[in-house]
Amino acid sequence: MRKLQTQGVHHITITGADRQSTIDFWEGVLGMPFVFEQPNLDDPNQGHLYFDPGDGRLITVFTAEDRTPKRQIVDQSQGYLHHLAFNVSKVTFDQAVERLKARKIPNSGPKDRGFMDSIYFRDPCGMLIELASYRFEPPEGFTHTDVLHRAHRIRVAVGADHIDKVHLADAIQELVGESAPTLS
């Protein structure tokens, strides 16, 4: 049977609160340019705001003026979204706690994830947001996924619990060795 082959995330749509609190969070806190808006074509009583998360794709938010932000924990049980993660540079990551604190946004503080660092906090409606920063740059011609796939194979071969820095370094060395000819 043939697959339906995806080629990346097209967009993610979130149910938000009112228009202004949505703009204040997605553009004001996370720095995503507010690209355009139009009515929700399935429910014209709602707005549909479009933001660029930094890669030219879209995060969209349905808004309604009768909804107010409620920073409550949203359902994360089976079948529901657990969290939404955004890539940030190391320099941005290093300032995230301070910048969230200045806005009085509670957060987890930095978390060591082996191949990346993470910080968690909630949007105005209670959805869990993660800021993630890779600890490595892939070699020219490769993606983060290429490195992580190779690092996973190395991790499994040595019996390690999770991908850590040594597995990343070894994966990068292997990928470069396979792609860069040498005379020695």
Image: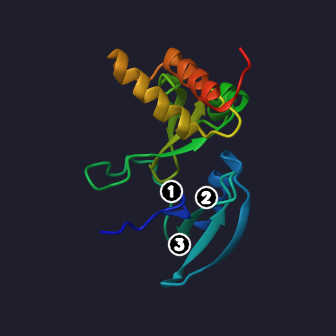
Q: Write down the residue under mark 3.
A: 64
Classify mark 1: residues with Cα within 10 Å, few (<14), some (14-19) or many (20+).
Answer: some
- Could you tell me which quadrant the C terminus lies in? top right
Q: Position of residue 88 (x, y in %)?
A: 65, 37
Q: Write down the residue under mark 2.
A: 21
Helix, strand or loop at label 1? It is loop
Residue 19 vertical placement versus 115 (above, below): below
- Could you tell me which quadrant the N terminus lies in? bottom left
Question: Image quarter for residue 152?
Answer: top left
Q: Are marks 3 and 1 in contact (CB under 8 Å)?
A: no
Callout 3 amino acid = Ala
Q: Position of residue 64 (x, y in %)?
A: 53, 72
Residue 69: numbered disc: 1
Say whether residue 131 is visible. no
Q: Position of residue 7 (x, y in %)?
A: 54, 61
Colour option used:
rainbow
Q: Which residue is at 61% across, 40% downward?
A: 143
Classify mark 2: residues with Cα within 10 Å, few (<14), some (14-19) or many (20+).
Answer: some
Helix, strand or loop at label 2? It is helix
Q: Are marks 1 and 2 in contact (CB under 8 Å)?
A: yes
Q: Is 118 left, or right, of 53 in this rendering?
A: left
Q: Position of residue 110 (x, y in %)?
A: 54, 24
Residue 104: numbered disc: none
Callout 2 amino acid = Ser
Q: CA distance from mark 3 to mark 1?
A: 11 Å
**Between disc 1 and disc 2, whose residue precedes?**
2
Q: CA distance from mark 3 to mark 2?
A: 11 Å
Residue 28 vertical placement versus 101 (above, below): below
